Image: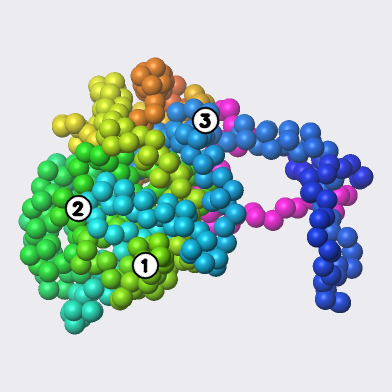
Amino acid sequence: MELLFEKSRKGRRCDLLPPLDVPPAHLMTGMERETPLDLPELSEVDLTRHYSALERRAHGVNSGFYPLGSCTMKYNPRINEELAALPGFTGVHPTQSADTAQGCLEVLYLAEELLCEITGMDAMTFQPAAGAHGEFTALLMVKKYHLDRGDTARTKILVPDSAHGTNPASAAMCGFTVVNVPSNPAGGVDLEALKAAVGPDTAALMLTNPNTLGLFDPNILEITQIVHDAGGLCYYDGANLNAVMGVVRPGDMGFDLVHLNLHKTFSTPHGGGGPGSGPVGCKKFLKDFLPVFHVEEGADGLEFKDPAKSIGSVKGFYGNFTVVVKALAYILTLGAQGIHEAAKGAVLNANYLREQLRGTYDIAYGDGPCMHEFVLTLHDLKKQTGVSAMDVAKALIDHGIHPPTMYFPLIVEEVLMFEPTETESRETLDEAAEVLKAIRAQADADPEAIHAAPHTTPISRPDEVKAARHPVLRYTPPEGQA
Ligand SMILES: *Cc1c(COP(=O)(O)O)cnc(C)c1O
């Protein structure tokens, strides 16, 4: 596909900028360009077609099934985008005084109240820009909480081996030592291993429940009790709340802090790099440690307050505000009943697809029901046919399905992790099951074809290590066009 620079023709124009309606300002002398900027010159239709062609090459929730496990790639209603784009929300400036932006503060205040209700927390910050950033923020609060009590011995964070990779990374970034807690044969936390790991050096446990195997840990109350008895805090990785929102609350499971990914569960599209939002909620006794810019009721309305023992600032001002607007719109349109039903739909869809595949693929930890996602293990398939999880994932692309999450969680071999989400219809799930069955049959009949998939994309199988280690990020114009 030609780049805009290659499509450029001298003198071709489209007027995209409105006419200047303020006096022109001039740069300091000596700062002007000496040669004109070499920008592509195109008509409006050239531009539109270029970007539409690029869009068609990308797979999104709007183009087809996108069962990316642990990522909650669900449909995000357009109305929420429209609300977030209202001029009253986009035209404010972060440094204007709070009394001139009461509506915006009310959005933050109400979103905090509702998300605290959903999570069972007492207060929340919207400063963090993503899930990992929320983990980092919460762990800084954990650290400050212990130090504030004069307890300097708590240097360790317990992380189950099924945890999302960001958990140990965030703990390490906050200067903690990471202690791995193994899973039991049912896929939950091994209680004996946990008891052996906790102690006076435990700062906190980081846990995802349901975990990345899509399993709800039935021992959750005992787990949080064990950590609390040892003087540690319990932190809930709520990046994907899709299975439990409106059903059970992390606060009632014994957790003291939680982060959410508004860009997974609460209606902000993601996958393209943001903006996201990873709010952190906490119980009352941790409220004073929240980051600055917390919205509170003052004498003359809502105002920003810096909590008494705040960890400080983890991002400018109050975070990615319009993402919070979308989350609030989503919660208010669904209502308590709708939130509950969305969670039930997500769990039903995952179980439905999983049962369609039982017998064709091996389900890891497949004895009981799953929550919003499930994992297949292709270990035996690879041994029998040579077809790997990567091969199946690539083959799905030719059928218009985005590959599921691959090779994660790390405790399952040749793993594919599916999360259909509540927005998919039964027909879509049936189709996906048929495609996966056809790929399974082809693994016996013609494994070579699957090794070579995808066949329908401009690039088939890039060298992934090379693409990561030696990315070509610089455009080289074709000969004679420099
Ligand atoms: C996505 C995810 C994260 C990290 O969220 P980012 O916004 O990508 O930083 C953390 N934990 C779990 C379980 C996740 O699925």
Q: Nearer the viewer, mark 2 or mark 3?
A: 2
- Residue 322, given in percent of the width and then of the height, sits at 50, 50
Q: Earlier in the sequence, mark 2 or mark 3?
A: 3
Q: Amino acid at mark 3?
A: Asn
Q: Which mark is residue 396?
A: none
Look at the magenta stretch and give its main secondary structure. Answer: loop
On screen, residue 357 above or below 230: above
Q: Amino acid at mark 2?
A: Gly
- The residue that mark 2 highlights is 251
Q: Distance between the Cα atoms at labels 2 and 1?
A: 30 Å
Number of marks in the rendered image = 3
Asked whether, in this view, residue 359 is left or right of residue 36, the answer is left
- The residue that mark 1 highlights is 299
Q: Residue at x 49, y 27 (%)?
A: 64
SS at circle 2: helix
Q: Nearer the viewer, residue 220 or 108?
A: 108
Q: Which residues are magenta?
A: 454-482
Q: Residue at x 81, y 56 (%)?
A: 21
Assess mark 1: CB under 8 A from ligand 1? no
Q: Nearer the viewer, mark 2 or mark 1?
A: 1
